[in-house]
Image (cartoon, rainbow, N blue to C red):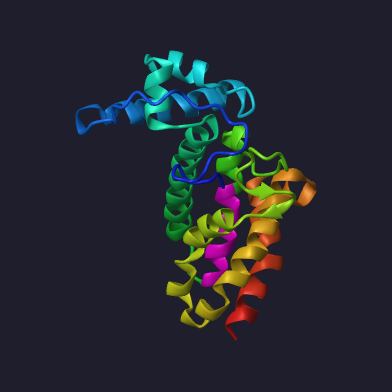
């Protein structure tokens, strides 16, 4: 994922001059407007073409106002991606819980729904190795991406408490499955019914074995 807003900016990143005025509680809604506008710009233009100027225009605020909340473009985009990721995670968990009766079924449903969610938002595909990608840095999964996926999969322990010691390993394995499902399609994954049947054959036994 992106760095948190408090992280040091990358070398060469542009900063606005400090005005001496910190954002107040009265104007805190401006931050939400900026984050919402950032998401809108990402959907319309993609991450690389989302700029401070475009977000300011979309939010109806000035560039200095954006800089008052986010010292760099990367910090602004990070906040937007964090919000989007949290919303996706919430939807995935809710949908998987509705359909699943076992730990293996929960894992399968989480993969099915996660693929659906990311395909509805192409700008958020976690498959690029660009530095602005929230999931991968230098072709390695980041701790942030694994933490987000872990939060999605934590309910699996409610179905089978024996899986608790293996949750990190299950998380990394299913992230790799998700990346593959987003990148490639075959007859086995061409629609959700086929995908679900395929994952039940391949993923459920793995989850069952981890808990045995």
Residue for point 67% across, 74% down: 206
Q: Is residue 47 above or below residue 127?
A: above
Question: The magenta stretch spans which residues?
Answer: 103-114
Q: Is residue 34 above or below residue 78?
A: above
Q: Residue furthest left?
A: 26
In this picture, residue 205 sits left or right of residue 116: right
74 in magenta: no
Place of residue 90 in the rendered image (x, y in percent of width and height, measured from the top left): 42, 50
Question: Which residue occupies the foreground of this view, 106 or 131?
Answer: 131
Place of residue 120 in the rendered image (x, y in percent of width and height, measured from the top left): 57, 35
Residue for point 60% across, 21% down: 45
Residue for point 40% across, 19% down: 64
Question: Which residue occupies the foreground of this view, 34 or 72?
Answer: 72
Residue for point 34% across, 31% down: 32
Q: Is residue 133 above or below residue 68?
A: below
Q: Quadrant of residue 2?
A: top right
Place of residue 25 in the rendered image (x, y in percent of width and height, measured from the top left): 21, 33
Q: Main secondary structure of the magenta part?
A: helix
Q: Quadrant of the C terminus?
A: bottom right
């Amino acid at each position: 994922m992106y760095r948190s807003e408090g992280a040091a900016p990358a070398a060469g990143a542009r900063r606005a001059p400090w005005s001496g005025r910190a954002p107040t509680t009265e104007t805190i809604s401006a931050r939400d407007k900026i984050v919402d506008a950032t998401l809108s710009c990402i959907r319309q233009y993609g991450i690389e073409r989302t700029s401070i100027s475009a977000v300011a225009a979309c939010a109806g605020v000035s560039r200095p106002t954006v800089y008052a909340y986010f010292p760099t473009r990367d910090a602004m985009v990070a906040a937007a991606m964090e919000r989007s990721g949290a919303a996706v995670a919430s939807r995935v968990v809710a949908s998987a819980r509705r359909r699943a009766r076992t730990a293996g079924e929960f894992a399968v449903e989480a993969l099915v729904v996660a693929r659906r969610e990311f395909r509805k938002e192409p700008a958020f595909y976690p498959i690029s190795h660009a530095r602005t990608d929230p999931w991968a840095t230098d072709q390695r999964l980041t701790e942030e991406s694994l933490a987000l996926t872990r939060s999605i999969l934590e309910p699996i322990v409610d179905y089978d408490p024996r899986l608790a010691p293996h949750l990190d390993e299950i998380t990394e394995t299913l992230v790799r499955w998700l990346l593959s499902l987003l990148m490639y399609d075959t007859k086995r994954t061409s629609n959700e019914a086929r995908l679900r049947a395929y994952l039940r054959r391949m993923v459920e036994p793995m989850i069952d074995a981890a808990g045995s």
